[in-house]
Image (cartoon, rainbow, N blue to C red):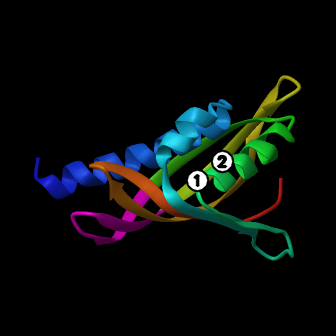
Amino acid sequence: MVQSEADRLQVIEAVTKYAWGYDEKDFGLLAEAMAANATSGGKITGTDVSWGPMNGRDEVVSGLRAMRNGQTIQPRHCLGNFLFSKQSNSSASLRCYLTLLASEGGRAGVATAGYFDIDAVKEANIWRISRLDVTLDAPF
């Protein structure tokens, strides 16, 4: 495997850590996925609903923890179609689709869909998310 492919897999793993960390309320894992100077925010298409920007790993993790702890659903982020637009030895930019499944009260289904815009950087030889912006197609 060439290095760029290995790096891409490590970037995707960082995004996966974010998703697992959020869904399972494992904010240590989520923090591990984020760069020290990470930023994050989001919006819901066709509405005035948005969140962020949150700046710095601690603020991002704290903000996401507050959002997650305010939810009664059990979310499951399903991510796919990772499309890299830029990549160097130390940074990358990509998009991926999000399908958000949710379970509550013994029922499960699709809560919403959308996409992530992501920048990643290599910090101390570990790929981390430096920017994660979420665009949702509909509220949930």
Residue 49 part of the magenta segment: no
In the foreground, 10 or 100: 10
Q: Which numbered tag is attached to residue 57? A: 1
Q: Main secondary structure of the magenta part?
A: strand
Q: Determine the secondary structure under disc 1.
A: helix
Q: Determine the secondary structure under disc 2.
A: helix
Provide residue 28's location: percent of width, then percent of height: 57, 34
Can residue 134 be seen by looking at this rendering?
no
| Residue drawn where x is 20% and y is 53% of the image | 5
Residue 85 part of the magenta segment: yes
Q: Identify which amino acid the numbered label 1 is placed on.
A: Arg
Residue holding disc 2: 61
Report whether 129 appears left or right of 87: right
Report whether 130 appears left or right of 46: left
Name the outermost residue toward the top. Answer: 106
Q: Identify which amino acid the numbered label 2 is placed on.
A: Val
Report whether 77 appears left or right of 14: right
Quarter-of-image position of residue 42: bottom right
Quarter-of-image position of residue 50: bottom right
| Residue drawn where x is 29% and y is 54% of the image | 8
Residue span colored magenta: 81-95
Label 2 near label 1: C-beta < 8 Å? yes
Provide residue 85's location: percent of width, then percent of height: 35, 73
| Residue drawn where x is 52% and y is 49% of the image | 79
C-alpha gap between disc 1 and disc 2: 6 Å
Can residue 11 be seen by looking at this rendering?
yes
| Residue drawn where x is 85% and y is 69% of the image | 49
Q: Is residue 51 above or below residue 124?
A: below
Provide residue 106's location: percent of width, then percent of height: 84, 22
In the foreground, 117 or 128: 128
In the foreground, 89 or 125: 125
Provide residue 94's location: percent of width, then percent of height: 42, 66
